[in-house]
Image (tube, rainbow, N blue to C red):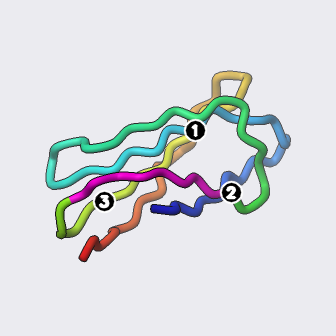
Amino acid sequence: MRLAYRIADVKGIPAKVTLKLQYGSRVVKKVVLLERPVNQKLTYACRCALRPGRYRLSVTAVNAAGTRSLRAASAMVTVR
């Protein structure tokens, strides 16, 4: 599975990113990525044995100054 995301930050400070994949209210995969560059397209690839269904992917970021993203980006992912 390859997940694409982008972090926008005016100051350009690298950020800690949390990717969370949920099935209903249950978290099935959570990954924390440290020191990720901002203001460019990024991807994260992993092998996941997921059952068919619809999952919600959410992305949150915290920059080095400790400022949390105003809102989490989210998208639905369908596994067939």
Residue underneath mark 2: 42
Q: Amino acid at mark 2?
A: Leu
Element type at mark 3:
strand
Q: CA distance from mark 1 to mark 2?
A: 11 Å
Q: In the image, is residue 12 above or below residue 78?
A: above
Mark nearer the viewer, 1 or 2:
2
Disc 1 marks a residue whose amino acid type is Val
Question: In the drawing, does residue 23 fall left or right of residue 49?
Answer: left
Q: Position of residue 60 (x, y in %)?
A: 51, 43
Circles 2, 3 touching at the beta carbon (< 8 Å): no
Upstream in the sequence, badge 1 or badge 2?
1
Whichever of labels 1 and 3 marks the residue nearer the N terminus, that label is: 1
Q: Which mark is residue 56?
A: 3
- Stretch of the chain drawn in magenta: 42-50
Count the labels in the image.
3
Q: Residue at x 25, y 57 (%)?
A: 50
Q: Quadrant of the C terminus?
A: bottom left
Label 1 SS: strand
Location of residue 41 in the rendering, given as x and y in whole percent from the top left corner: 72, 62
Q: Is residue 56 left or right of residue 71?
A: left
User: Disc 3 marks which amino acid?
Assistant: Arg
Asked if labels 2 and 1 touch by Cβ distance under 8 angstroms, the answer is: yes
Residue in view at x 78 percent, y 59 percent: 40
Residue beneath disc 1 = 17
Q: Check disc 2: other Cα within 10 Å, few if <14, some if 14-19, many if 20+.
A: few
